[in-house]
Image (spheres, rainbow, N blue to C red):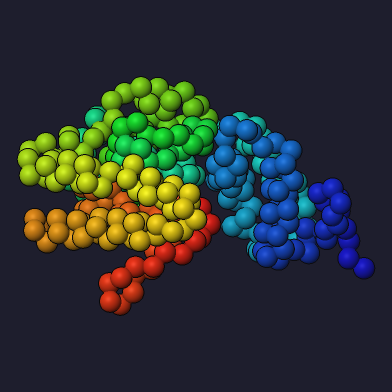
Amino acid sequence: MTERIEGPPGQSISHPSLWGIDQFEANWSLFMETLRKEEASLLIPWERIRWQIEHCEVYQEVHSNWETLDPGKRLDSWKRLLVAAEEACRTVLPVCVRCGQCCRMGSPTLHEEDLPLVKEGKIAWEHLIALRKGEPARSPFDEKPFILCEERIKLAEKEGTRECVFLSSEGDRCAIYSDRPLQCRAQGCWDPLPARDTAELPFLLRSHIFEAIEVLLEVIAEHESRCGFQALSQAFEELGRSKGENIEQVLKLLSYEDHFRRFVSEKFGISPQYLDLLLGRSFSRMAALFGFRVLEEPDGSRRLFPEGPGA
Ligand code: SF4
């Protein structure tokens, strides 16, 4: 008969002396889940706490030696590990441990102070995106939605996620850590105040980045006047009011904005990968904000499909 010990409430687990590494990890996950429910901080992301627990000396030692550990000593090691985990959980270090959790919750907005990073090429144009005046955004501090009253420049995020483009594919390393923007340097998951203070500092604008390229400033101004976000917003509002009758007006606007982008790219030899910075996201992509998906047919015409809201 299998020997049993006390496990998380409502669960029965076999004796640690019988566990292989897979069972060790399965039981560890159960224990982490229990700890998360009991100890989770409202402020600090649980993934950050778990990172710290799993990087403590005791975990590293017990986990890496589990398979070779004398079965008679596994129970003691397991108990030692649980005590160390609870202690680590209650003493979260007030330092950035580079767990990558903040970087998965949204990319930073850039400030004027970050301009040298862009000018010196430490952050390339293709990794930047302009959010234009009038676009909806979410506060990085409390996730509350708001409307931008002036533009913002952000680092791009990986397609379909909120993960910063500079977070390594292994998920816990910033590719530009020593040259990361002000907001990242100020951010501490153990203390939100310094990052909140940066929100009072002047934000980076496209006019700072392109200040020496007069013609691009003119292109930005022309695009704003002909294809401002307000125009897109009004077209979709009207679409809703007219119960779909003015769909042609929306499609015309999407097509015009797309034409504008292509024209700028070809006339000025600007790589399409820089257009999200120069002109913001395309209207076709932003249709998702209004609950629509745009499909381009082979003949270049567009069709609009209702979809769940989201950017
Ligand atoms: S720049 Fe680096 S530190 Fe900042 S969010 Fe991106 S990956 Fe994280």
Direction bottom: furthest residue: 298
Q: Is residue 46 left or right of residue 185?
A: right
Residue 185 visible, this angle: no
- What residue appears at the point 44 percent right and 47 percent down from the top-left corner? 237
- What residue appears at the point 49 percent right and 27 percent down from the top-left corner? 192
Q: Is residue 120 above or below residue 286?
A: above
The quadrant in which residue 71 appears is bottom right
The quadrant in which residue 3 appears is bottom right
Q: Is residue 162 left or right of residue 11?
A: left
Q: Nearer the viewer, residue 279 or 230?
A: 230
Residue 248 visible, this angle: yes
- What residue appears at the point 49 percent right and 36 percent down from the top-left corner? 145
- What residue appears at the point 8 percent right and 58 percent down from the top-left corner? 267
Direction right: furthest residue: 1
Q: Is residue 219 above or below residue 147?
A: below
Q: Nearer the viewer, residue 59 or 37?
A: 37
Q: Nearer the viewer, residue 56 or 173?
A: 173
Residue 114: % across, % down: 25, 34
Residue 202: % across, % down: 28, 25
The quadrant in which residue 230 appears is top left
Quadrant containing the N terminus is: bottom right
Q: Is residue 29 left or right of residue 233?
A: right
Residue 199: % across, % down: 38, 26
Residue 10: % across, % down: 86, 51
Q: How many marks?
A: 0
